[in-house]
Amino acid sequence: MQTAANRRATFKALHEKGRAFLMPNPFDTGTARILDGLRFDALATSSAGYAWTRGVKDAEGLISRNEALSHAADVISATSLPVNGDLENGFGDSPEDVVETIKGAIEVGLAGCSIEDYTTDPHKPYYPLDLAVERIKAAVDAKNTIAPDFVLTARSEGPVQTEHELEETIKRLNAFVEAGADCVYAPELKDKEQIARVLTAVNAPLNILAGRKNFHLTRKELGDMGVARVSIGAGLARIAFGAFITAAEDMKDGGAFGAFDRASGIIDFEDFMKAKP
C-alpha cells in the first residue's frame, strides 16, 4: 500500500491545468474496491453517498466529523489510490472547526479534501464572504504546517444561473485562491460557456462535477478547455440506489422477478472483492 505522503504527492501532481483527470466517488468499502480495481487516477468520498448508506440526508448536519473521517479511513484502506475527502463545511462554522477537520483529514491519510461555503442553514445558506475566506485561510495555514502537499479544495456552493450569480461565484473562487486554496470547485457549473468564463477569470486548478443529469461534455472537451479535475459526486451512489429501488418496485408492483434477469449481463463485481489468500 502507498504511504500517505506518497498519495499526497501523487494527488498534487495530478492537478495540472488541462489534464481533466477523473476522480469518481465510492460510497463504501466495496465500491472503493471496485473503483480501485478499475484503476482510476484517484478516488473521493461522497458526503451524500455515505449519508444515504447511513439512512440520512446529506448536508443537514446528520453526519459527524468523526463519522466522515472514519468512513474516509475505510475507503483509504480499500485502495492504493489517492483519496480526496468530501468534508462538507468542515463540520462547524468557525475557522477553528475547519482546522480540526483538516488535522483529522491528514491524520487518517486523505490526500486532499474539499471545504464548502454552505452553512447547512436553509435560511442563511452561505457564509458571508469574509468568514468564508477566513475559514479557508485557517485551513490553508493548518495544512501547510502539517502536510504542505495536501490538496485543499475550496468550494463555492451558490447558484450560477444569472450573470450576477456567476460573477459572485467568480469573486468567491478568486478570494479562496488568494487565501491559498490549491483547487477550486463550484458544483453548480455545468454550462460550457460558464466553465470557460471561470477558467479565464480564476487562476487555479478547477474541479468540475460531471455525475449528474444533462451533463454532456466529455473528459477530452473539459481537458481541452483547461479543466484540471473531474469528479462524479453522488452520481454513482444515485445510480446504485436508483437501480435498487427500481428492482424492488418491479417485484412489489408487478409481482415478477425479471429484474434479476436484466442484471445477468452486468460485470461480476465480486472479482474486485478481497478474498482469502
Image: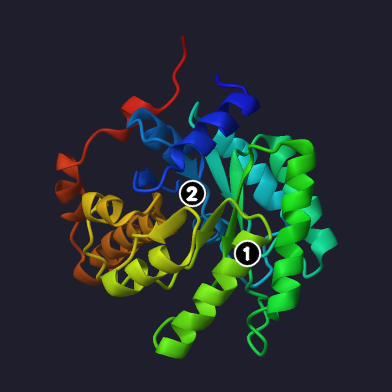
- The x, y position of residue 13, in whole percent, is 49, 35
As drawn, 206 above or below 212: above
Q: Residue at x 34, y 43 (%)?
A: 19
Identify residue for label 2: 27
Q: Secondary structure at mark 2?
A: loop
| Horizontal side, residue 33 vs residue 70: left or right | left
As drawn, 50 above or below 193: above
Assess whether mark 2 and mark 1 are in contact (beta carbons under 8 angstroms): no
In this view, the residue farthest toward the right is 96
| Horizontal side, residue 115 vs residue 79: left or right | right
Depth check: give the residue in front, 247 or 88.
Answer: 88
- The x, y position of residue 45, in whole percent, is 53, 49
- The x, y position of residue 270, in whole percent, is 34, 30
Q: Secondary structure at mark 1?
A: helix
Depth check: give the residue in front, 241 or 58.
Answer: 58
Q: Amino acid at mark 2?
A: Phe
Q: Quadrant of residue 190?
A: bottom left
Q: Quadrant of residue 226?
A: bottom left
Q: Nearer the viewer, mark 1 or mark 2?
A: 1
Residue 176's disc is 1
Q: Residue at x 29, y 58 (%)?
A: 243
Q: Residue at x 45, y 68 (%)?
A: 201
Q: Residue at x 44, y 49 (%)?
A: 25
Q: Amino acid at mark 1?
A: Phe
Local crowd size for mark 1, using a 10 Å CA cut-off: few (<14), some (14–19), many (≥20): many
Residue 57 at least partly seen: no
CA separation, marks 1 and 2? 28 Å
Residue 184 at least partly seen: yes
